[in-house]
Image (cartoon, helix red, strand yellow):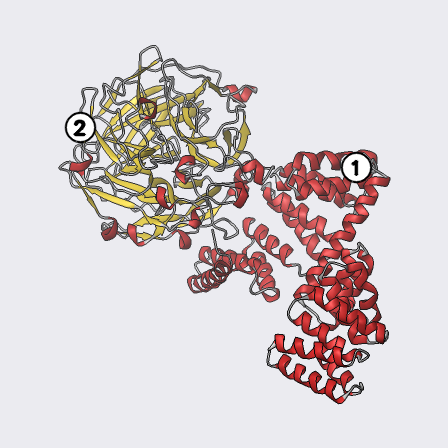
Amino acid sequence: MLNRVSQTVCASALITSLAAIGGSILEVKPPNGVDFTLQNSPTPQKYLIETMPGGVALLDYNNDGLLDIFLVNGGRIDPMHPENFDRHDPRYWNRLYRQNKDGSFTDVTEQAGLANAGDGNYGMGVAVGDYDNDGYPDLYITNYGKNILYHNNGDGTFTDVTAKAGVAGGGWSVSAGFFDYDNDGKLDLFVTRYMDWDMQHSKDCGGNFHTYCPPGEFPRSTNILYHNRGDGTFEDVSQRSGIAARKGHGLGVAFADYDGDGFTDIYVANDGMQQFLFHNNGNGTFSEVALQAGAALSLDGGPLSGMGVVFQDYDNDGKPDVVVTTLPRQTYAVFHNDGSGLFSDRGLQTGVSMLSGVTSGWGVGLEDFDNDGQKDLFISQGHVLDNVEAIDPSLHYLEPTLLALNRNGRFERVDPGTDALVSGRGAAFGDLNNDGWIDAVTTVLGAHPQFFINRGGNAHWLTITLRGTRSNRDGLGARVQVNGQTRFATTAGSYESANDKRLHFGLGSAKSAQIEVFWPSGTRQVLSNIAADQFLEIREPERP
Amino acid sequence: MIRTILILWLAWQTASPEAIQHLEAGRQAESERHFDVALAEFRKVTELDPAFPAGFVSLGQACMEQRDYGAAVAPLKHALELDPNLAAAHRLLGYALLAQGYAAEAIPHLARVQEQSALGIAEIETGQFSEAIANLQAALQKRPNDPDLLYYLGRASGLLSKQSIDALLAANPDSPRAHQAMAENYFVLRRMPEAENEYRQALRLRPDVPEVHLELGQVYAGSSQWAKAEQEFRAQAKLQPGNAETAYRLGTALLEEGKVHEARVELLRADRLMPDMPETLYSLGKAASLEGDAAAAEKAWINLLSIEKQSSLAAQAHFGLAALYRKQGKTAEAQRESQAFESLQNSSNQTQPGK
């Protein structure tokens, strides 16, 4: 039942982190071997897709215990042939980098069968999930164009199974995520779509300034829900489930069971309008309840330019909260889960409002960077308009990355390890070097990704890998409680990105942990007196 | 109105029967909007009776009705040569000259007949902003809410303000007020670092210069630097403890910092200093709600809704009340407030196309 896959790393009497003594927790350190540049190809025509990529995923595709990196590329935009994108050209490929034992990376894109993302596809995001429960994580790539499902063959290669699976979607997809909405043990797929837009009907806004248009200039679109039939194919149940009943400007998506009814719910960050909270009715249908739940609008009732979203418990009350990143002149929303299906905006009390207001947030994570037992806030930032200074000199296209440590429910800005100003977009979180401390990778328009490597400290930690048996194999959707903290197992969230599936807990000074797992199958599993500082695999009991 | 006066005046003018006949034919054609015919008739009147001022006035007016202000000037001037006291001719000539851009030349004619609206506009053109404001305000007394008059009054006031500031900057370029004026300019342009620098210079020269702390606080608030904003608002509150706006802004800064209780204290003070300000009431309700005082929040927002029913603040108050009632389990009330909120949002969206 319990299989420990790693030994205890350290146990120090001095519990501290670098932040506590005034240093930076993270350092920005590009690893050897990652030479990716996110080619968004900005043009004078201001095609809106140019400012929206791209995703990053942290996954262990070859199950060697080391996190690998997948990066989504945009494409080349030639106004003479605007729907081409030249994805056969290696400069515009998505890239898979395999991590080597020495921490360097090797580009394995071509040998993995992931080269050439299909002409006509301008890349956006990535989702990771083992949809066929074969033990190897599969990849789903969202595009402006057709989406692609790559099945992981388990031998270091992938096969494009989109056509067979029936998940190409179409239009402009942005973020996606695997989750099991009907608890049948097979991962389903949710895809956000931004708007009904195409290159031929593009336009610029801002008069003489020529800016990217706000989403309200284009019709809203529906999101897509695919049900996994379990035979390698999916059924589009967007209509039947009620998901397609609401049109929006969907960007980010995150999953958690916010009302504890045992069924995973969906939160969609919409740009320039109310946000969506799709409550899972438990019978294959969803009801959009954000407004009545108090999780749709700002504290003052204003629409939000929702970009990225994370659905985790920031205040250790056991209930998942929502953080939505937005554009300037709004503040990032913190919807605290008050229980009884209600949320309240706690942007002011948590200090998050103070941290935003003039910045644009995209990828976002609630992760415990200093292992003190409280989830911290990390946000990839950069304005949507590359000429915003000309319109409003008080705003900036290039922005710093935000790291804010959680001090008993209040977030305080700290040095993220770099003062570089970037046009940040995607962000993924995971323990890249398996040292027990969470790292982050962000994507930057027109530039290399940024690697935020945790410098570590002495606090204790525990990293859990779930091994579902009756539930889906990776236990996505499980609620895991460790020493009073709660995480909801998911690879989704952030913006266009996919996180390490392992669940990381900072334990502070605690050298052992009490663990409770609530599996999607309904099984509750308790593990007591588990030693800290280890990577632990928890296998779901075969029988309830 | 001009036309009525003209008709009455013409009634006691004397001219040859033939000229009068053409005059009446011209007026008839004019009323039927046959302006070419009218023009020909009036021109005939001036030819038949060159000493008959009404003929020239009618000809000028006909030209103006055809928007040919340049052609109107000569007959109207001739009419005034024949009779310098012709009010109608002065009025029409004033308008014609103003329309042609000859504001200075138009002013004596418009002043002569106290045509205050046009006079005010002409005075803006000639840089007599104080006089323009006085005349436009007088005209507005007679035609309240006239959009053109309101626009020109606003423009005249703005230009007067600019004139004063220009004079200030020229005469006292390094004075606290000059730096304050520069700062305000930068603030409008959203050039916050420059605005901050100018305000700082103003304070360095005169630490107690009125309003500067308040304005500098708004610079910080505009860039979400709430701790600095609080500091400046506090400095202003120390200088002017009776200033309700300062108390309100200090309250909102504290609220943004999450210092909910302190915010409430300041907002209550603002409410005492200037009761029933909708902005204060809204923030007061918000602070009370965040502090968990549902009764006080409800009271503030209901008070606001008794003052404003259609504004964006009213919508926000309905939204706040809906959340409040939802938490209290008052489903019907929450539903009602939600509907009121959505109704105001929808009407607002209909008047704001685009995003």
**Residue under the image location 72 percent in, 81 percent down:** B4
Q: Amino acid at mark 1?
A: Ala
List the single residue furthest toward the top: A102
The number of numbered badges drawn on the structure is: 2
Q: Amino acid at mark 2?
A: Asp
Q: Is residue A212 visible?
A: yes
**Residue under the image location 78 percent in, 34 percent down:** B201
Are the residues under badges 1 and 2 in a single subunit?
no
Q: Quadrant of residue A534?
A: top left
Marks 1 and 2, how far apart in space? Answer: 70 Å
Q: Quadrant of residue B17?
A: bottom right
As drawn, A474 above or below B336: above
Query: Disc 1: which chain?
Result: B
Q: Residue B206, how many percent across, how many down? A: 83, 37
Give whichever of A428, A149 is nearer the camera. Answer: A149
Q: Which mark is residue B202?
A: 1
List the single residue furthest toward the front: B48
- The quadrant the N terminus of chain A occupies is top left
Question: Quick one: SS at disc 2?
Answer: loop
Q: Residue A2, how many percent across, how many down? A: 24, 24
Q: Is residue A489 visible?
A: no
Looking at the image, residue B267 sits to the left or right of residue A23; the answer is right
Q: Residues within 10 Å of mark 2 (few under 14, many from 20)?
A: few
Q: Residue B296, how many percent across, how many down? A: 59, 57
Q: Which mark is residue A134?
A: 2
